[in-house]
Amino acid sequence: MKVIIAGGGTGGHLFPGIAVAEEFQFKTKDTEEKTEKEDILFVGTVHGIEAKAIPREGYKIKFIRARGVVGKSFAETVKALFTFLLSISDSLRILKVKKPDVVIGVGGYASAGMVTAAFIKRVPTLIMEQNSVPGFANRFLGRFADAVAVTYQESIGFFSKDKTFLTGNPVRRKIFETEKEKAYSCFPLERDKFTVLVFGGSLGARSINNAMIEAVPHLLNLRDRVQFLHQTGDRDFELVKDHYRKAGFKGVVVPFVYQMAEAYAVSDLVLCRAGATTLSEVTAVGKPAILVPYPYAASNHQEYNARKLEDMGAARMIKDRELTGELLAASIRELYANDAKRREMQNAATAFGKKDAADKIVNLAFSITRKR
């Protein structure tokens, strides 16, 4: 089975694609349709997170020209549409060489050219939608893709019902299979301390970083019992690291965490944004969480995601505009002290999480290839 997985730009699009790639290998390892790592090709842009992340995962990647359209000026929109035509040309060349059995679009503008080119060449296509409100690229691609895999029931209405399937958002197996003791080998953390994992997406989140800087002075009496594993993004790395150091807190501060499975395994509490992929991972591992939705997400879908988990008792939500160091410190302190509450949140998160989404999507991919 030869597979092209197209898209990326952010971890929210890319990591579900990696989960599907791994599931192809796992599911077909003892079958006639065995899919090896070299049978899978990722397609993205040189500017997206995929340019660094995919080689680290051991997969091949090809780059095409693509740029965003939404929210751009007229001149920028014209340039983006011209670039889209170039991306189709780039993709047609890749298809001619790779000759895939299926093309899977994981979202982001890098997926548009490749999925369109696959449609032109009559290669079976499947797109994945992580959010409750689909983005521009997937709404366009959904018109002619053979199948659409969605995370939320609310997304189905944006696509043709006869080819749209509620699968959940794929999570890499190692996210929920990594053992805690083995995970400590990745980070210089102390095993007997309560660990708070902080991250704001692949590029970091300035409001979360600033709130943690403000929160640290309110948590000084816990520095012998609490430690942080904080992904800051490149911009704020030195600033955040310096504040933890001056306050005397132990832990790990890095621009980017590549070993997210291990990071989840060693954490007792997660502080993060509320993107669909992040929440799929957090609930798959059953971690209590403090969620700070990104306020500029399309159709405010992150707040919708976070409120859904909060209503279930799986997380706490703090709106970005209400986020302060004092409020954040109080939330961390309360959840640190309340074991029973954390167990309740863990149980609720686990009940919401879907570990079989990647399996469903691989089955769907095989189904559309057999129909063709």
Image (cartoon, helix red, strand yellow):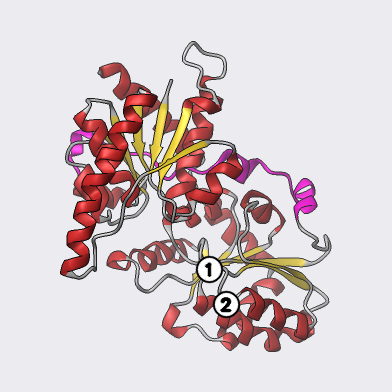
Mark seen at residue 74: none
Give the magenta range: 159-186
Which image quadrant is residue 340 in?
bottom right
Query: Residue 365: x percent and y percent?
Result: 36, 27
Q: Amino acid at mark 2?
A: Asn
Placement of the N terminus among the 4 image quadrants: top left
From the top left corner, tell me how far across and down residue 133 is, in percent.
28, 57
Q: Residue furthest top?
A: 32
Evaluate whether residue 356 shows in this view.
no
Q: Residues within 10 Å of mark 1 (few under 14, many from 20)?
A: many
Q: Is residue 171 magenta?
A: yes
Q: Which percent across, then down, holds residue 316?
A: 51, 70
* Distance from the alpha carbon under mark 2 to that under mark 1: 8 Å
Whether residue 181 sits left or right of residue 54 in the image: it is: right
Looking at this view, is 81 or 14 the one in front?
81
Q: Is residue 233 above or below residue 121?
A: below
Sequence-wise, the earlier of marks 2 and 1 is 1
Q: Amino acid at mark 1?
A: Gly
Which residue carries the number 1 mark? Answer: 204
At a point 36% along the width and 45% down the height, the residue shown is: 64
Count the numbered circles shown.
2
Residue located 65% across and 40% down the image:
177
Q: What residue sits 61% from the left and 80% below the top?
A: 212
The residue depicted at 23 percent of the width and 68 percent of the height is 72
Q: Are marks 2 and 1 in contact (CB under 8 Å)?
A: yes
Of the pair 365 and 234, the residue shown nearer to us: 234
Would you say residue 178 sits in the magenta stretch?
Answer: yes
Question: Which type of secondary structure does the marked residue at label 2 adopt?
Answer: helix
Disc 1, SS: loop
Name the image quarter holding residue 240.
Answer: bottom right
| Residue matched to label 2 | 209
Query: Residue 301, position in %: x, y?
Result: 33, 64
